[in-house]
Amino acid sequence: MKVLLFGATGMIGQAVLRECLLDPSVSQVITVGRRPNGGTDPKLVEIVEADGDVTRLAPHEPQLREVDACLFCLGVTSIGLDEAEYSRLTYDLTLAIARQLVRINLHMTFIYVSGAGTDSTEHGRSMWARVKGRTENALLGLGFHAAYMFRPGAVLPQHGIRSRTAWYNAVYTLIRPIAAPLAQLSPRHVTTSDRLARAMLVVARDGFARPNVESTDINRLGGR
């Protein structure tokens, strides 16, 4: 399986890249980002857009035609953003990339990291949930061979992976001693970065019965 990965330098993206390189069913992983990952694995192909425009995919179309699955881990927190800005960085960016990919490679499976509590009606009170719901609905309507919306709750980073969000690292430092039992005791609300990454690869390879993959599904699939 050839995998395309967006957001490989973020907390979830780092975990996904790690699992891709460990998984023998993944023959190649192509990352698209603003800076190098620093990896040297022979399975890794990096596309670095130094000007920051990760939506410029036309020069890479020959590579992307051979991809089996796109794992989309780009995302920002809504804290401090109004709806217009959060929509630009969430809906607009994601759809700008996805619309190109479905034209380049209709047979690709697209997996989007969303979040628990996403509002599929697009009319709820929570701004971030509405925007995520609108993004999910648009992705599901694009016509990919298959598209899955992953909705994890709290994600606990493993294997030394750190978030670029300082407050998240501070919180995790406090709860690290109880992180493992917390994930076991509350599978509806908590997962780990490695379980999330493994679950994404399982669904990319084998599919899933529903388009929305919730936290309990993630823990079950990623615990295999």
Image (cartoon, rainbow, N blue to C red):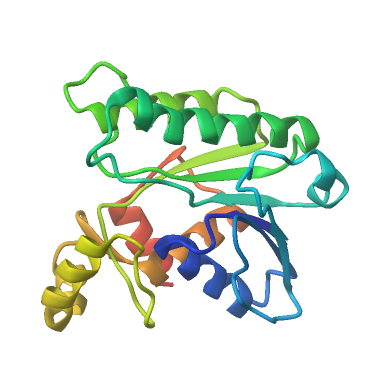
3 horizontally vs 181: left or right: right
Q: Give residue 1's position: percent from left, percent from top.
A: 72, 62
Q: Residue at x 37, y 67 (%)?
A: 193
24 horizontally vs 112: left or right: right
- Viewer-closest of 158 and 32: 32
Q: Residue at x 15, y 62 (%)?
A: 186
Q: Give residue 166's position: percent from left, percent from top.
A: 25, 64
- Corner quadrant of residue 117: top left
- Corner quadrant of residue 123: top left
- Viewer-closest of 209 and 134: 134
Q: Residue at x 27, y 28 (%)?
A: 82
Q: Give residue 169's position: percent from left, percent from top.
A: 24, 69
Q: Is residue 54 above or below residue 191?
A: above
- Corner quadrant of residue 124: top left
- Could you tell me if residue 42 is visible in this image? yes
80 horizontally vs 209: left or right: left
Q: Quadrant of the C terminus?
A: bottom left
Q: Give residue 32's position: percent from left, percent from top.
A: 65, 55
- Residue farthest to the top, as pictured: 123
23 horizontally vs 126: left or right: right
